[in-house]
Amino acid sequence: MDKMAKFDHDQDGKLSEKEFALYKENETLKADLAKQNDQSNMAWTAIITMLGFTALLFMPFIDVDRVAALADMIDLFYLAQAGIVGAFMGATAWMKRK
């Protein structure tokens, strides 16, 4: 009830319907913000992972034959990471349109 106490404007120990609606709206906004931050972090992690993996492939200690043997799996890795980034960017653009 401590979280709800700051919404009790008349200090009667009970939340009115209006106060409870404010509390619910605040909690919903907090949850939405946390979700958006998590999605943003996931997209940035995917971008950084793709860049790091690309840099790793060009290192001199990585054998070209090994890269050629893993080419199909590397393609799927890039496709999955780009899908995460694309889904985030698309969802963000769609939400701004609403």
Image: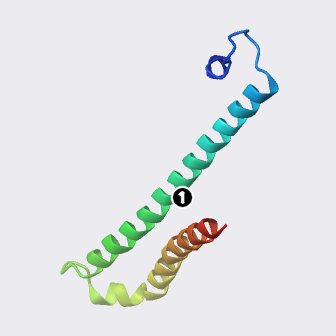
In the picture shown, does residue 98 fall above or below 27? below
Residue 5: image x %, image y %? 65, 17
**Residue at image point 51% right, 81% down:** 79
Residue 6: image x %, image y %? 61, 20
Q: 59 or 11, which is in the foreground?
A: 11
Q: Which quarter shows the C terminus?
A: bottom right
- Tell me which corner region of the image, top left, top right, bottom left or bottom right, holds residue 87: bottom right
Residue 4: image x %, image y %? 67, 22
Circle 1: element type: helix
In the picture shown, does residue 17 fall above or below 65? above
Q: Which quarter shows the N terminus?
A: top right
Q: 19 or 4, which is in the foreground?
A: 19
**Residue at image point 36% right, 67% down:** 48
Compared across the picture, whether 85 is left or right of 91 comes to left
Which residue in the rendered view is the most extreme toward the front?
Answer: 10
Residue 68: image x %, image y %? 37, 90
Q: Amino acid at mark 1?
A: Gln
Mark 1 lies on residue: 39
Compared across the picture, whether 35 is left or right of 54 comes to right
